[in-house]
Each structure stands twice: as C-alpha cells, then as structure tokens.
Amino acid sequence: MINFKSLFIGSIIIFILCFVLLVVSYTLSKDLPDSEKLSPYECGFSPFSDNRIEFDVKFFLVGILFIIFDLELSFLFPWSLVFISINYLGFLTMLIFIYILTIGLIYEWLRGGLDWY
C-alpha cells in the first residue's frame, strides 16, 4: 500500500505543477497576432497559384529514406554501449543488419532515389 501512496502523492504533485505552469504561461504570455501569424499557410508567404498544383513526390521519398537510415542510428547507439559485453551472435546480427541497410542505401543511390531534382 505504501507504494501506491507515493504514486498517488507524486501524481497529485505533477497535476498541480502542470496546472500552475499552464496558468502562469497563459497569464504572462503576450497575444500579439499579426497578418503573417494569422495566415493559414505554414511556409510564411502567400501561394503563387492554386493550392492543388501537382508536385514531385521525390521529396517525400527522400524523407522516408532519411527516417529509415536515421532509425539505423537508433539501433547503433545502444549496440555500441553494450558492444564489449555481447557475444559473437550479437555482433554478427548487427553486422548483418548494417550490411542489409548498406546494400539498400547503395541501391537507392545508384537508382537516383537520393537526388533532389
């Protein structure tokens, strides 16, 4: 029961702290809207033509590839921390993982998937 009591007290403290921070930020913030801030476009300028123009999807493909290879780094950091204590199977598994991603990167590079134009 003592564990639930400390959890309950911690939850109450967190709730009060969040409420206080919200109230303080709402009361101290300056609300000065201007025409740029109220515009519905995120890019910061008005569009030149219709919003429904066709655009190249290659930007999104490069973004997806970036996310894939960025996830590779999220696996490499924990692996590098336990590198000394893992056995040969863990080492071999990570080498196969890196090899597959490297082959995929080379394939995308040769196919022109990383070109911006």
Image (tube, rainbow, N blue to C red):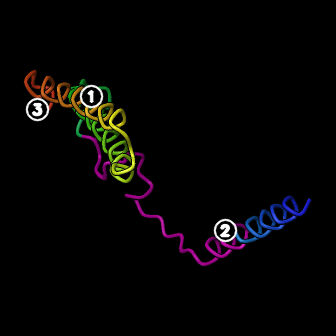
| Residue closest to the far bottom | 28
Going by the numbered disc 2, the residue's amino acid type is Leu
| Residue 96, numbered circle | 1
Instruction: Tell me the quarter of the picture where residue 61 sits.
Output: top left
Which mark is first along the chain, 2 or 1? 2
User: Where residue 21 appears, x then y in whole percent?
Assistant: 66, 72
Going by the numbered disc 1, the residue's amino acid type is Ile
Which mark is first along the chain, 2 or 3? 2
At x 83%, y 66%, the residue is 6
- Residue topped by disc 3: 115
For the C terminus, give its image quadrant.
Answer: top left
At x 76%, y 64%, the residue is 15
User: Where residue 26 appears, x then y in whole percent?
Assistant: 63, 70
Rounded to the nearest angstrom, the CA distance separating label 3 from label 2 is: 45 Å
Q: Nearer the viewer, residue 28 or 104?
A: 104
Is 58 within the magenta?
no
Residue span colored magenta: 18-47
Q: Nearer the viewer, residue 66 or 34?
A: 66
At x 27%, y 41%, the residue is 47
Q: Are marks 1 and 2 in contact (CB under 8 Å)?
A: no
Secondary structure under tag 2 reads helix
| Residue 77, numbered circle | none
Instruction: Tell me the quarter of the picture where residue 5 sits.
Output: bottom right
Secondary structure under tag 1 reads helix
| Front of the two marks 1 and 2 | 1
Which mark is first along the chain, 1 or 3? 1
Q: Are marks 3 and 1 in contact (CB under 8 Å)?
A: no
User: Where residue 88 appears, x then y in whole percent?
Assistant: 32, 36
- Residue topped by disc 2: 22
Up/down of 55 relative to 66, above or below: above
For the N terminus, give its image quadrant.
Answer: bottom right
User: Where residue 63 appears, x then y in whole percent?
Assistant: 27, 36
